[in-house]
Image (tube, rainbow, N blue to C red):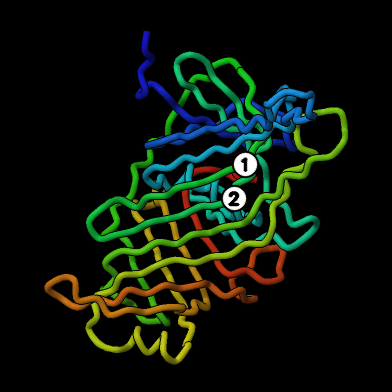
Amino acid sequence: MPQPTFRSFLGIAKETTFGTAVAATNFIPVKSMKPKDKQTLLDDAGMRGSMVDSYGKISGPLTSEYDFDGDVFPDTVGFPLAGVLGDVTTTGASAPYTHAMAVLNTGTGQPPSYTLSDYYTITTRQYAGAKISEVGLKFSGDGLLTYSAKAVALGSAPASAPTPSYTAVPPIAGWVGAVTIGGSASTILIDGECSIKRPVDVIHTVDGTAAPYALWSGAVSVNGKLTLVMEDDTQLLNYLNNSQPSLDINYSQGAAAALVQVKLHMTKCAFTDAEIDRGKDYIALSVNYEAVANTTDVGGSGGYSPIKVTLQNALATGTYK
């Protein structure tokens, strides 16, 4: 018989040792989950006097990819954000805790790895060693704050089904956000997005196993788009003059121990393209930007970082990393 899609759920937990699967400690409400085991099959193409080009398939390296997305919950969204950036500094003795995230620039520079536990009624499959390669946040005045995430992991393995337990924190409406461009509060943002990306190299060695020797995270880049009501030429001039203004997208709601926050801070944003848009009854400006690495948006590991992400929620020190 068919199995119901909507009974699926996703669990996550940080790993102590890369690739050693651990039981889920948190559960992320998601709208879609797209796991893909990538079994490489190697062709036996040695000619044997017949008009064929392949005489067999030999099992090669095995990895997996895992994409998931949904509405932003200010606590569980910290897992993919910490997983792509790496440097996490948590302060506070009780809720709300403050988690400042930036690029990790000490040691090997490697962010944490996670085990993803994907339940799909038939069974649960765990994707250990998951390294986040991309997190995208989207915001608009007429929708919810949303995210998408991509990960590279080891090949999946069956596991016992965990018992899910979900956050009581609701998702955030897009209109709640406060926007600052170049140090000035702005009310003209219609919609936008911010993508934090870093490549994950799959390193295969001759070591007696089909699993990779390492999943190695590379350098971080941040870019995005903004659609703005064009009241004047201020933002167009930021592009034409290469002014590289600061950009803050700040979502905060609740009070006392129930206070939550998701804040994106980029001290230097280079507007790489700007186009006047007359497609609606009002004039808009479409802007592409890249966040420039600087010494202000850093965490405890110092160095340079193009962005600092700040979360406030009830999750304590050590949750994300």
Q: Across the whole image, how many numbered discs are drawn on residues?
A: 2
Q: Residue at x 40, y 61 (%)?
A: 193
Say which quarter of the image contains residue 203. Answer: top right
Residue named by callout 1: 152
Q: Residue furthest bottom?
A: 241
Q: Is residue 160 above or below residue 137?
A: above
Q: Are marks 1 and 2 in contact (CB under 8 Å)?
A: yes
Which residue is rendered at x = 40% and y = 47% of the image?
A: 72
Q: Is residue 321 left or right of residue 120?
A: right
Three-letter code for the amino acid on which mark 2 is drawn: Ser
Instruction: Decide: is 241 above or below 103.
Output: below
Residue 221, relative to residue 188: is it above or below? Answer: above
* Pointer 1 or 2: first along the chain: 2
Residue 120 to residue 234: above or below: above
Out of 57 and 86, give the one closest to the viewer: 57
Q: Quadrant of residue 271?
A: bottom left
